[in-house]
Image: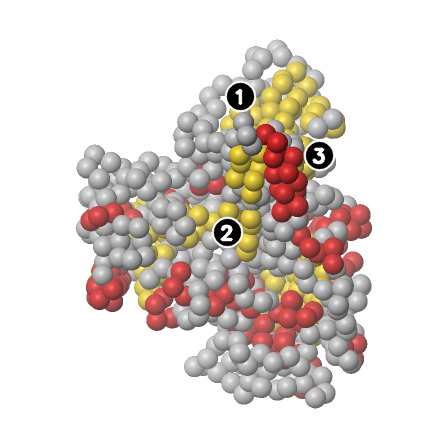
Amino acid sequence: MRALPYLPLLALCFVLDLAVATEGVSMAAGERGWRAAEGSAAIPRIVVLGFDGVDPRVLREYVERGELAAMRALIEAGGLHLLESEIPPESPVAWASILTGVNPGRHGIFDFVVRDPATTGYRPVNGMVDLVPPRFLFGAVPTRPPRVTSRLVHETFVERVAKEGHRALGLRPPLAFPVRSTPGARLLSGLGTPDLAGTNGAYGIYSSGLGLGREYTIFNGHRIHLEGGPTATAFDTYLEGPYDRRRRDADGGYPRLSTPLRFERQLPDGPVTIEVGGERAVVAAGATSPYMTATFRLPTLPPWTFRGRVRFRVQNVEPLEVLAEPVQIDPSAPALPISAPGDYSKDLEQRYGPYPTMGWLELTFPLNDGVLPDEAFLKHLLELMERDHAMLLGEMGRGARCVFHAFTPTDRAAHCFWWLRDPGHPVHDTANAARWKGRDPVLEVYRRMDQVVADVRARLAPGEVLLVVSDHGFQSFRYEMNVNQWLINEGYLVLKAGEESGTRDLTQFFGEAISADSVDWGRTRAYALGLGQIYVNRRGREPQGIVAAGEVAPLIAELRTKLMAARDPRHPEAQVIREVYDLTRLYHGPKAADASELQLGFGPDYRVSWQTALMGELRPAGSAVFADNLFPWSGDHCSTDRSLVPGILLANVRIPPAPAERPYSVRDVAPTVLRHFGIDASHLDGTPIPLPPRATPAGARREGDGR
């Protein structure tokens, strides 16, 4: 009890510390100390449009069919060039290389999921941001706030351009969260920005019917039963928000804070009135509510509140079924820094209306869980494209000389509708495809992309430059390989006697309820987690490592030889793994030691299994390694060999073909932008793409023009 007199002081310290708890909170400083570079206004503006996952073969197919007039015009102006993706060709890794111009060993992004060196050393954790949880005295008084930092450790070209005195605009740049104070730039964070729960898309599905099945879905959904029966017209329930990190629940994870939620329906066909946080919305069956404000309270001293935004989709009225989308960070009062300056997110809402802030914008998780109809998902993608389209056009008129915007629905459309393009996919069947009556969802999203390109190009003055890039392409994802099961069968990973790991889900992942207790680490030489990474259980690095330094290289060579020979007994003619990359040789830089030793590059139709990423479904030796992919997520690129999934590079100016021995790379985009402004890029790993001389201001450095 002696601590009681100090509680007010501790609370004050917490409040003060919160101001520096996350990168970018000091953005109120805004333009302080920033000065425009001499002659900046004379340098032609450059706009980089990033369209996640646009595949060059798909693009050419549509153009040759007479679609995508704006993209056709760019191809005629500057050519369609392949852009070699990163190893691995994953969005966070490849976008990090696009934005920085350096390899993963220098920028620090390796995967969506990485190992956790801070605690067990083996638990999978978020590969885009690092979270240090808060601490509490007596479970009530916060003594240390949460600290969130981006794992991207290298400066981006948007930041560098602004630092050198040229106004910059970055809309949804991946890995920018939490946004750093960047005088001279307006920034809204993209991929890597969490929802209010700190996940990439925790959602709820409420139902008054029976047969809900698994309470927590594979893809981060929570099924909540509504009590009342078939004749009830009102249901009182709860909406879940942030995790309560003061204590753990019976499953070993963190519980979530909640706030009251009420549904009132008119039988038999609706509408449904939804009430949360003192707001009410009347929603028809099949429709989605506007964004509604929800406040969650952590009962600390002083109380800690979190304000978020959420939308609800009424799936059905009898039985009542309502989808609660992920609770978003509120852009008008963000709980964490999502923009620079700090009030820029609010300014955007005032100009363009409410918008989602979560980096994973699209509702792919409810779609994969069978909760969201695919027609509704496509409508959602098109709405996202339209909203960001309007935002980009409006913000381009506010004086930025360097503009970057990343659009992600192009990627999600290919992920979730590839089965329509691939009659051999396990999800494809004639009746399923017939529902679309010849419609092509991927094309519909690409058409919105084409309109964005047309409108942006129309706003460029003579001499201004437009680059259109994608981070990777696509292929079919028919079959999956549980890499850890292969390691078990080959004797590299050993389970404890009588132990195995069941199916794991994203709720366990984000709730930090995943352990590696089923593995006998004293006899395990290698293990896999993430999307194609294999780690050596190194002595001196892993907590229970057994592989000595001198044994690492021979083990890597042995694993590579065996993995290249791996075959799916159901399709013995297929080359499952096209390449196994030794990252100890390919990555260099201060973060290289944090990477895995090996990265798999799968061949056509194959990918690492969903459960491999979280070290799930570990069975006794001899169990099956391969399985069909039965999710709508039917196209992919993660863990694919990068030679199979190049991205695109287009421009409104002529770009010469890349030399055969050195294709254009995702690492070349940043140095190209920097050279455009006369900024030294010689320290980067990429090489400037040779634009025509008129795109380079007089007196600018021309290093790296020759390729």
The amino acid marked with disc number 3 is Thr
Residue 258 image-quadrant placement: top right
Residue ID at (66%, 16%): 234
Residue ID at (73%, 66%): 184
| Mark in front: 2 vs 1 | 2
| Mark in front: 1 vs 3 | 3
Label 1 sits on residue: 225
Specify which label sits upstream in the sequence, 3 or 2.
Answer: 2
Quadrant of the drawing holding the N terminus: top right
Query: Which SS class for mark 3?
Result: strand
Q: Residues within 10 Å of mark 1 (few under 14, many from 20)?
A: some
The amino acid marked with disc number 2 is Asp
Measure the alpha-carbon separation of dots 2 and 1.
Answer: 34 Å
Label 3 sits on residue: 293
Specify which label sits upstream in the sequence, 2 or 1.
Answer: 2
Tell me residue 603's x, y (percent). Answer: 35, 60
Label 2 sits on residue: 130
Looking at the image, which residue sits at the far front?
A: 2
Measure the alpha-carbon separation of dots 1 and 3.
Answer: 23 Å
Residue ID at (64%, 58%): 180
The amino acid marked with disc number 1 is His
Query: Which SS class for mark 1?
Result: strand
- Does residue 624 lie above or below 114 as drawn? above
Tell me residue 600's x, y (percent). Answer: 35, 60
Which label was assigned to residue 397? none
- Does residue 579 lie above or below 370 as drawn? below
Q: Residues within 10 Å of mark 3 (few under 14, many from 20)?
A: some
- Does residue 666 lie above or below 420 as drawn? below
Tell me residue 235's x, y (percent). Answer: 63, 17
